[in-house]
Image: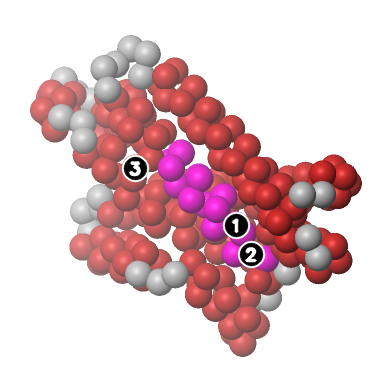
Amino acid sequence: MDINLMIDITPLLVKAAWVTLDISARGLFFGFFIASALVVLRTSRHLPLRWLARGYISVVRGTPYFVQLLLVFYGGPAIGLRMDPFTCGVVVGAFNIGAYMSEAIRGAIESVDSGQNEASRSLGFGRFATLQHIVLPQAAGLMIRSIGVLAIILIKNSSLVSIISVVELTYQAQRLIGSTYKPLEVFTLSALMYIVIIYAVMGLVELLYRRATRYTFL
């Protein structure tokens, strides 16, 4: 194994790893708001809105992320939707992970005993106040861990944006292999960087989980 080569290409892969983190973080950030909107629609009193949310979630979860990415990037211009590769990666990632995240959030909320909801309403709390002060603090632990798992999935899926020429970690590794003809060294180093990123995210999620559940028993 060529250690000197690995040392030389480390700065290039680190720079590309930051792109991986950037596109994943943006996708997760916007995905959270999409998920929140879907949860509101799923719990709406209006049946058409519930159907709309369910239909969207079913379509997104029933099709591969790779296909969604290609459909938006290459098919979008046909309907006037043109985005640069990075923006496309963020948008598709957000709408994809938002569908999964909405189910994770809804599941965490529904895991809270319904009796507490009823007791809160009987004390005069409104629906929003009950959700804010009673339900969400108890659901936070489960929600954080579920979102953490989805964040890791999104980081791994970000490697697929290399197909539309986003210079993230996988794409940079492929370019370096083309110029160095050393796939073992390049992919070993890129794999190590993915491991570092994933375990850093896992550590952050565990920290947030402990802070969120320090007064509860989950």
Query: Callout 3: helix, strand or loop?
Result: helix
Residue 147 placement (x, y as % from top left): 43, 41
Residue at the spot of label 2: 161
Residue at the spot of label 3: 105
Q: Magenta segment range? A: 147-162
From the viewer's perspective, tell me whether residue 181 is left or right of residue 214: right
Q: Are marks 1 and 2 in contact (CB under 8 Å)?
A: yes
**Residue at x 22%, y 39% (from the top left corner):** 110
Name the amino acid, label 1.
Ser
Query: Callout 1: helix, strand or loop?
Result: helix
Residue at the spot of label 1: 158
* Residue sitting nearer the eye, 40 or 211: 211
* Residue sitting nearer the eye, 84 or 179: 179
Quadrant (top left/top right/bottom left/bottom right) for the C terminus: top left
Residue 116 placement (x, y as % from top left): 16, 25
**Residue at x 34%, y 42% (from the top left corner):** 105
Give the CA separation, mark 3 to mark 1: 22 Å
Name the amino acid, label 2.
Val
